[in-house]
Every structure is written in C-alpha cells, then in structure tokens.
Image (cartoon, rainbow, N blue to C red):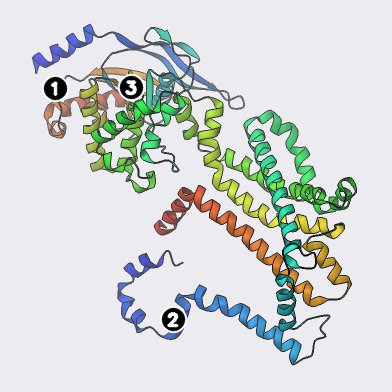
C-alpha cells in the first residue's frame, strides 16, 4: 500500500489540496503501523486490567498484569544457571529447538533437492513421505521420550521431524521452479550437474527455502515444548506443566511471554538472514509491486 | 558495389566451412499425439566469418535449428558437422545469446559475465580483465558491479552478449535476442552486433522474425517456412560493410526485403 503511494500521488495531483489539508484522522490512517498497531496491545492490556481489578476475575484464572510482570521480573532476575529462573529453562528450550531445526532443515533440504533431481527417487519415496506427513507428528512425542529418555535428544528429534517437512517441500518446489532457460544457459557452457546444482538451482531456490525456514522456525519451538510436556527435567515446557499443576497462573503467563519472545527472535533471525541471502528476490518483489 | 561483392565471394571461397548440415531434421516423439516434425531436410554450409540470419514465422523451426547448432538438443535425422565433427553436445566452440538475457539476479553483471568461465573451470583471474574490456566495448564498463535489475532491457541483453563473447567462441548463435526490446533500442543493438562482428570476425548465426533485421544483419539470409519447418531459400545479401541504418531506406535494401517476403508468401506463411 505504502509502496504504491508515490505513484498514486503522482497521478492524483488534482487531489493534492485535499491531501495537504492534513486532518489528524487522515494522518493516523496514513501511518497506521505507528499509531494503531501499538494501540492494539494497549487496549488489550487495559481490558485485561479491567477484568482483574473491576470485575474481580480470580488470580488462578486470570492473574493481574502486575502479578505477571512480577513473576517475569522474578524469573529473569535469577542467575543464568539457576534452575528456579527463566534463563536456565529458556536456554535449554532454545538449545533443543535450534539443534532440532538445524537437523530437520538440513536433512529436509538435502532430501528435497535429491527427490527433485532424481524423478525415479521422487516416484518411489514421495508417497511414503506424504503418508508420514499426514501423521500428526506431535503424537510421536511420547514414543520418542521412551526411546531417547528425558534428556535433550528426544526433544531434538521431535523438533527435527516437525521441521523437516516444510524444508523438504520448499526445496522441491524451489528446484521445480527454476526457469529452464537458466539450465539451458548452464548446459550451453558445459556445466556439470553438480555445478548446475550449486550455481543455478540452489541460489534460485533460496526464496523458497527461506519461506520453508520461516514456517519451520515457528514449528521448532513448538516441537521442543511438546517434547518437554511429555517428559523432561528442564525447559520452558516442563516449567509450564509444573506451574500449571500448582495452579500458579502468573508464572505460566510469564513463561508464555518468554516463549512468544523466543518465537519472535527466531522469526526475526530468519528474516535478517533472508534479507542477506535473498536481497535480489526482495528487490524484485518491490519493483514488481511498484510497477503494478 | 561490384568490387565489394566480388570481395565477399572471394572471402567465402577462401574461408573454411565451420558448420555444415546435410539432411538435418528434428522430429519430436510426443507419444500421445504422434510425432511432430519440427525441422526436415535442412542443408547448408556456413563458412568462417559469415553473418547468417535465419528468418521465418514462428513455428518454422528456426529456434530448433539454433538449438541443434548449440548442441543443447541432438538431431533425429541427418548430420550437423562443426569443424568437420558431428555435433554431439554443447562445446566451447559455440556460444549462445538467448531470447531473454537470463542474468542471474544474485550475481553482479561482472559475475554474470564470468559465469561461463566458472562453469568451464578456466582461470578466473585471466578472464576478469577481458570481461572489463568486453563490457567497455558495449558501454557497460560502469555497470560491472551493478545487479541485473538495475539495468534496462537493452543493457541486460548487451551483458548477455558479453557473457557469450567471453568464451571466445568460433560461432556466436543469437536466438531472437532483441525480440523483447523497443524499436529504437533494437536498431542500436543491431549496429552493436555489426560492430562486434567487424571487430572479431566471428561467425554469427542470428535468428529473427524481422525481415529487415535479417537482411541488415547478414551476408546470407536463410528463409525458413513452417509445416514442416525447412529452409525454403538462401538469399545472398550483397550489401557493403560497414552498414549504417540509412541503408534500410535504400531501394536496393527494399529489393531484398521484397525477395525475402516473396519467398515467405510463396510458401503461404505470409498471406
């Protein structure tokens, strides 16, 4: 919307006097992401506070914002290795999610490129993989805890299984989307198959891989948490279960906030990496939007 | 005029044949819909340093013929000899300028131009200077470190030409390279092609569907017709080099246009 405005402004020169009239409402509408977006959580916070203090919602159902803030502050004030604090458990959950994400993403990407490169392999293996994908993988968590115990490994494998598919699918889609012209160009220069893969197919598929990684990065935290729900000695998931069973709702909210922040950080890291490695795709998208 | 045409004939007589087709044909076996004959009974000799155009309506097999010459596809009938040897696949003697520039958006212009050098695993350092020289000859020296999207369509296609020339091929194949450009850019690009040809004396095979372009850019025009694709006639163009755009308005040029058009009309492709 905002990307189009310079063009719209150029063609709508006759409307200029009205625009420069600048009523406050118009200004708010023009800068919605700076005005209305921050307002939304504030309104929700006010409603939350109102529900607690005016309508007397019990603390075990809905703790007051102040209680949640206290629990958060208390959890974050502890030393990093203090098992009663949030840092320790957040670190473990992040570790499990990251290891699982890397494992799942690497295996998924490699298998995706392999399936897309060898049609015979695709025909043989893909139906099996689709059947496996149809299975709700969260349901595998109890089994993996039995196999790998209460340590990190089980959670890493669950996360890997969950994050594997988005990357497999996007690597395949990315490979199939490579313009045949680019392959012809490489072939006319006597490029070997591995050169074509490295210099043409993988870079061409990058935007697809990042779309897959974006999905997978959100799923990664989910995988670790589910694993910790089923059985763990540490981690935010285990913490959630413990606080929940003790009906300590304020710390539950604090953990949820930390989880939200971790998810946001993961997403942000993927976005930054995408801007670095796929700068060309984004520019093209911008010019497309400006051109349309 | 007379002296120049005899000169041309002499040059032809001296230069060796670089590309020869005999009974060349291409039939695509589509299975369900039966066979599609894209090209049949093609015979020609192209001599070193010639400037040949393939002109014809779409579907006449001119792109198929060019792909056969490039080695990207192999013929189903007849023979195609490159320097006396049957073409069995792409090789360093032939470079292609494609319809679209096909520049990789994540590479700078310089990196795009050097891509064939990377694929062929030639020493990059030796070719960097050459790349700058070639970019300079087409007026892209200042854009070596730009990304493709920062260039206009004409500039992108010039980079595509440089990418072909960096391989120093014997034969330069150009597959309707200026089809997507506006008329004025196209004329300038045509002059560029002539300039490159005069400088390098490479054999150039130029595919186009513009009759004017085909005559302006060649000493021989292969007129192709469709259903099935074949070469209907080969017209010698005895017009002097160097050529300028004014040539297009001369009566002699008009005569050649008439001859090519007549040839296309006889076969019913231009009625």
Mark 3 residue crowding within 10 angstroms, few (<14) / some (14–19) / many (20+):
some
Q: Position of residue B190 (x, y in %)?
A: 24, 33
Q: CA distance from mark 3 to mark 2?
A: 61 Å
| Marks 3 and 2 share the same chain | no
| Chain ID of residue with mark 1 | B
Judged from the image, the secondary structure of the residue bearing numbered disc 3 is loop
According to the image, label 3 marks what residue? B168
Q: Relative to residue A225, is residue B92 depicted above or below?
A: above
The image quarter in which residue A125 lies: top right
Q: Is residue B271 visible?
A: no
Judged from the image, the secondary structure of the residue bearing numbered disc 1 is loop
| Chain ID of residue with mark 2 | A
- Tell which tag, 1 or 3, sits nearer the viewer: 3
Q: Position of residue B113 (x, y in %)?
A: 37, 33
Q: CA distance from mark 1 to mark 2?
A: 68 Å
Residue for point 58% across, 47% down: A208
């Amino acid at each position: 919307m905002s990307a189009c405005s310079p063009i719209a402004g150029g063609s709508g020169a006759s409307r200029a006097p009205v625009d420069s009239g600048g009523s406050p409402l118009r200004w708010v509408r023009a800068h919605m992401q700076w005005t209305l977006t921050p307002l939304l959580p504030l309104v929700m916070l006010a409603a939350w506070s109102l529900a607690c203090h005016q309508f007397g919602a019990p603390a075990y159902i809905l703790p007051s914002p102040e209680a949640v803030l206290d629990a958060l502050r208390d959890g974050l004030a502890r030393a990093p290795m203090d098992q009663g604090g949030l840092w320790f458990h957040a670190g473990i959950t992040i570790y499990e999610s990251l290891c699982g994400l890397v494992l799942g993403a690497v295996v998924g990407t490699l298998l995706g490129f392999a399936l897309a490169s060898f049609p015979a392999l695709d025909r043989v293996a893909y139906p099996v993989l689709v059947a496996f994908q149809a299975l709700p993988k969260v349901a595998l968590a109890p089994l993996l805890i039995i196999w790998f115990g209460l340590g990190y490994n089980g959670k890493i494998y669950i996360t890997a299984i969950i994050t594997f598919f988005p990357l497999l699918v996007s690597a395949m889609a990315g490979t199939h989307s490579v313009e045949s012209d680019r392959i012809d160009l490489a072939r006319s220069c006597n490029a070997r198959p591995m050169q074509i893969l490295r210099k043409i197919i993988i870079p061409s598929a990058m935007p697809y891989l990042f779309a897959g990684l974006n999905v997978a990065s959100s799923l990664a935290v989910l995988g670790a948490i589910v694993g910790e729900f089923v059985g763990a000695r540490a981690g935010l998931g285990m913490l959630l279960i413990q606080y929940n069973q003790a009906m300590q709702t304020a710390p539950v909210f604090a953990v949820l906030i930390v989880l939200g922040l971790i998810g946001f950080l993961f997403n942000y890291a993927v976005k930054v990496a995408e801007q670095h490695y796929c700068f060309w795709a984004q520019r093209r998208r911008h010019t497309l939007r400006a051109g349309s | 005029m007379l002296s120049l045409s005899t000169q041309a004939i002499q040059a032809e007589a001296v230069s060796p044949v670089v590309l020869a087709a005999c009974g060349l044909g291409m039939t695509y076996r589509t299975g369900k819909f039966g066979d599609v004959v894209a090209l049949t009974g093609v015979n020609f000799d192209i001599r070193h340093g010639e400037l040949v155009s393939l002109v014809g309506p779409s579907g006449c097999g001119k792109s198929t013929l060019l792909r056969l010459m490039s080695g990207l596809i192999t013929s189903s009938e007849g023979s195609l000899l490159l320097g006396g040897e049957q073409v069995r696949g792409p090789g360093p003697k032939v470079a292609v300028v494609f319809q679209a520039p096909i520049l990789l958006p994540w590479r700078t212009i310089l990196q795009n131009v050097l891509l064939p050098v990377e694929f062929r695993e030639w020493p990059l350092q030796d070719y960097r200077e050459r790349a700058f020289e070639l970019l300079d000859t087409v007026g892209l020296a200042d854009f070596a470190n730009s990304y493709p999207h920062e260039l206009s369509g004409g500039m992108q296609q010039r980079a595509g030409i440089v990418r072909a020339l960096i391989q120093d091929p014997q034969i330069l194949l150009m597959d309707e390279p200026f089809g997507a450009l506006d008329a004025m850019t196209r004329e300038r690009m045509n002059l560029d092609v002539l300039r490159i040809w005069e400088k390098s004396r490479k054999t150039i095979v130029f595919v186009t569907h513009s009759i004017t372009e085909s005559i302006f850019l060649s000493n021989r025009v292969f007129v192709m017709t469709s259903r099935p694709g074949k070469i209907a006639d080969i017209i010698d163009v005895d017009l002097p080099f160097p050529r300028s755009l004014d040539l297009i308005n001369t009566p002699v040029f008009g005569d050649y246009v008439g001859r090519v058009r007549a040839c296309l009309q006889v076969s019913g492709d231009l009625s």
